[in-house]
Amino acid sequence: MRIAIGSDHAGFRYKEMIKTHLLELHHDVRDFGTYSTDPVDYPLFIRPVAEAVGRGEFERGIVLGGSGNGEAMVANRVRGVRCSLCWSVESARLARAHNDANVLSLGERLIEPGQLIAIVDAWMDTPFDGGRHLRRIALIDAVSSG
């Protein structure tokens, strides 16, 4: 799977861990930065990830920050993106199963290191349930394209 990933300085350490994990699973991963823990403005790194997913260049995106809140807000401003802020395996599973989330937002300051990869794997491995959720996704997408 083609995956875009990006973070600010507060999410850099987890971004690197996730990137290594995804590469070990033979995913095609493009890192949009940042490339250190030096302070940066997160929209400069998150928006390009979301735009690449929105254009269909990548099937999924993962964005990270201290809380993940601002990163989700930036990503969700891009047409075609359904970014979900997740903090547990169950929130990640439901983001995919019910919302067909194509971008995952994570907060490094809010997730224990031992839970990080399990959350990412749940999000990566869970298929969209479709069914009754299809009409809801259509309603979400109609709002973002209006």
Image (spheres, rainbow, N blue to C red):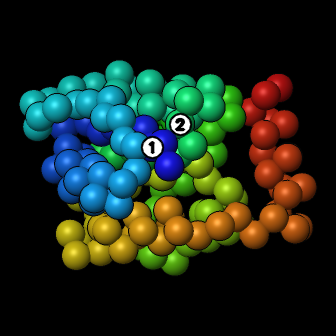
- Which residue corresponds to the image point at 31% horizontal and 35% vertical from the top-left? 31
Left or right, 48 with respect to 84, comes to left
Q: Quadrant of residue 29?
A: top left
Q: Residue 38's x, y, as percent?
A: 10, 31
Q: Secondary structure at mark 1?
A: strand
Q: Residue 123's x, y, as percent?
A: 50, 64
- Specify few, some or many for label 1: CA neighbours under 10 Å numbering under 14, 14-19, or 20 or more: many
Residue carrying label 2: 58
- Specify few, some or many for label 2: CA neighbours under 10 Å numbering under 14, 14-19, or 20 or more: many
Tag 2 and tag 1, C-beta contact below 8 Å: yes
Q: Secondary structure at mark 2?
A: loop
The three-letter code of the residue at mark 1 reads: Ile
Q: Is residue 23 visible?
A: yes
Q: Quadrant of the C terminus?
A: top right
Q: Quadrant of residue 145?
A: top right
Left or right, 51 with respect to 69, comes to right
Question: Of callouts 2 and 1, which one flags the residue occurring earlier in the amino acid sequence?
Answer: 1
- Which residue corresponds to the image point at 11% horizontal and 37% vertical from the top-left? 37
Q: Residue 62's x, y, as percent?
A: 42, 47
Residue carrying label 1: 3
